[in-house]
């Protein structure tokens, strides 16, 4: 019999990236990111496995062990990538779950591929999990997996966590085959969301679509209890603090500031280049502040890191073109030789550079139109152990529920954006500290380890809660 594992994580991506060495040899390196650092010790401690895609289309490599985890690659053909990943996941579900800020597209072949790939993931997990073991499924690409897995392995404890928002009932109702997706999630014992409202939306839908009778945090379905609750995700606080107190990172922050013009106040944006992140709204507000003279190119500079993301999807290519046109317009109109008002970086940076930017920034501007959580906000407040800096944060980011002393803003309202950015630029030392300190404490006390522990302990206690 092949080996089995007490704890199995199922996510679209494996927690490693393939690295090609100079001599052409291939190895795997752990991919950066809070989720991986949080789950890896748990997976390792429990002798666990991780099911996911390598990120490369074509045949999957043989399962292998890395960093104390058993990694089980799932194959995606080029067509699967196009239909399941770029199509159904990122052109249907992603926009719809983010308030349809871009029009969701609906295609039958995408849905069929989504089904087939979800089944492949469910089968892999079913094959690996030990009798009575625990499986934790992640995110919107795999919403059918819990029910598929439950059919194959009714003995398992199954948890699901959604990293993105869960839409209001009216929006969800637009999805073709919506009931099937909902039944997919109901295969789990515990369905976790970023915010309580998302859990409520989900429970309401079970009544509306399936005629179930949800009660505060749970619903009975096919003789089982399914619990729906918020578990706001967080960051690896230790990692950010270590970088932020590293003398080399601090020196890099000083160097960046000096290069950008020592006396200019630094506004910073860090996002995946995604239409949900409100980058265009931020640029519009900044451009207007320059145009009406509220700020000038001598006093301020905006650094916008836009990490490349989903570049094969048309909406992302169009967004990139619009953002780059606007950056060019602002620099052309308000720049001077050797001094641009916007520094735009369409590239992925390493963690140390990112934290150096956090340390250098006077105002961090985070303006998503809708965001499950937004980890950049939490990273910024933890990096600022010096109590300096100011966080402008969209009310529509999950993080706003916890970071209550941020400069909260409605990014749909350009006047509000301009007003709040200006306020943040003028906050004195006392106000900065008064706002930053409680936010930092909040995140320090609720880091990613606590998040994972809370989820798994709840799963442990709910999986056995069978109705009478
Ligand atoms: C989804 C949900 C939810 C960014 N640029 C670089 C880089 N990053 C890192 C940040 C941060 C992470 O990527 C981004 O996380 P966010 O939460 O801000 O956003 P999404 O990617 O949209 O994440 C979101 C999250 O899942 C977790 O549940 O919060 O709402 O949309 O850690 O620092 N890292 C490196 N180079 C970069 O250029 N190394």
Image (cartoon, rainbow, N blue to C red):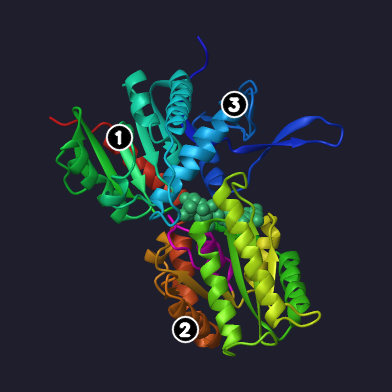
State which tag comes first along the sequence, 1 or 3: 3
Q: Is residue 109 above or below residue 282?
A: above
- The residues colored magenta run 364-385
Q: Residue furthest top?
A: 1
Nearer mark to the viewer, of 2 and 1: 2
Residue 442 image-quadrant placement: bottom left
Does the magenta segment cover residue 404? no
Q: Residue at x 47, y 80 (%)?
A: 420
Q: Can residue 452 be seen at all in this image of the molecule?
A: no
Residue 87's x, y, as percent?
50, 39
Task: Report whether the residue tagged 3 is closer than 8 Å to ligand 1.
Answer: no
Residue 218's x, y, as percent?
21, 42
Residue 249's x, y, as percent?
72, 65
Q: Which residue is mark 3?
A: 77
User: For the residue labelled by badge 2, is the local secondary structure a helix, a strand or a loop?
Assistant: helix
Nearer mark to the viewer, of 1 and 3: 3
* Distance in Å between CA atoms under marks 3 and 2: 49 Å
Task: Report whether the residue tagged 1 is closer than 8 Å to ligand 1.
Answer: no
State which tag comes first along the sequence, 3 or 2: 3
Q: Residue at x 19, y 43 (%)?
A: 208
Disc on res. 189: 1
Pointer 3 local density, CA inside 10 Å: few below 14, some 14–19, many at least 20: some
Q: Is residue 49 above or below residue 459?
A: above
On screen, residue 45 versus residue 229, left or right, reads right
Q: Is residue 200 above or below residue 127?
A: below
Q: Residue furthest right?
A: 23
Pointer 1 local density, CA inside 10 Å: few below 14, some 14–19, many at least 20: many
* Distance in Å between CA atoms under marks 2 and 1: 45 Å
* Distance in Å between CA atoms under marks 1 and 3: 31 Å
State which tag comes first along the sequence, 2 or 1: 1
Q: Which residue is mark 2?
A: 419
Q: Quadrant of the C terminus?
A: top left
């Amino acid at each position: 019999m092949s080996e089995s594992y007490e704890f199995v994580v199922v996510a679209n991506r494996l927690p490693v990236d393939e690295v090609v060495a100079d001599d052409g040899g291939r190895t795997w390196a752990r991919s950066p990111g809070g989720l991986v650092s949080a789950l890896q010790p748990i997976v390792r401690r429990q002798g666990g496995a991780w099911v996911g895609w390598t990120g490369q289309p074509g045949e999957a490599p043989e399962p292998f062990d890395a960093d104390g985890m058993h990694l089980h690659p799932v194959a995606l053909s080029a067509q699967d990538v196009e239909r399941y990943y770029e199509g159904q996941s990122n052109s249907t579900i992603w926009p719809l779950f983010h308030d349809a800020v871009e029009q969701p597209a609906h295609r039958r072949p995408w849905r069929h591929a989504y089904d087939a790939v979800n089944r492949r993931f469910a089968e892999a997990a079913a094959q690996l999990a030990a009798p009575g073991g625990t499986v934790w499924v992640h995110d919107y690409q795999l919403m059918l997996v819990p029910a598929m897995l439950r059919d194959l392995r009714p003995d398992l404890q199954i948890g699901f966590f959604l990293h993105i928002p869960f839409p209001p009932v009216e929006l969800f109702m637009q999805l073709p085959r919506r009931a099937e997706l909902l039944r997919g999630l109901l295969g789990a014992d515990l369905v976790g969301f970023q915010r309580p409202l998302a859990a409520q939306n989900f429970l309401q839908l079970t009544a509306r679509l399936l005629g179930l009778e949800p009660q505060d945090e749970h619903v009975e379905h096919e003789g089982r209890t399914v619990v729906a609750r918020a578990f706001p995700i967080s960051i690896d606080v230790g990692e950010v603090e270590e970088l932020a107190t590293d003398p080399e990172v601090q020196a890099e922050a000083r160097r960046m500031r000096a290069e950008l013009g020592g006396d200019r106040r630094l506004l910073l944006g860090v996002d995946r280049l995604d239409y949900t992140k409100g980058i265009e709204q931020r640029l519009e507000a900044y451009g207007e502040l320059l145009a009406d003279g509220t700020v000038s190119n001598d006093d301020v500079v905006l650094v916008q890191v836009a990490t490349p993301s989903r570049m094969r999807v048309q909406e992302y290519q169009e967004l990139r073109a619009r953002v780059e046109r606007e950056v060019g317009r602002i620099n052309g109109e308000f720049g001077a030789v050797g001094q641009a008002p916007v520094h735009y970086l369409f590239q992925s940076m390493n963690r140390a550079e990112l934290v150096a930017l956090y340390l250098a920034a006077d105002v961090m501007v985070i303006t998503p139109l809708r965001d499950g959580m937004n980890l950049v906000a939490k990273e910024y407040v933890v990096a600022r152990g010096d109590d300096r800096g100011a966080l402008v944060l969209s009310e529509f980011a999950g993080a706003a529920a916890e970071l209550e002393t941020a400069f909260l803003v409605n990014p749909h309202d350009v006047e509000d954006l301009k007003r709040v950015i200006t306020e943040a630029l003028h906050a004195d030392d006392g106000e900065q500290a008064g706002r930053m300190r409680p936010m930092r404490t909040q995140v320090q006390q609720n880091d990613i380890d606590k998040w994972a522990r809370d989820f798994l302990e709840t799963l442990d206690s709910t999986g056995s809660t069978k109705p009478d």
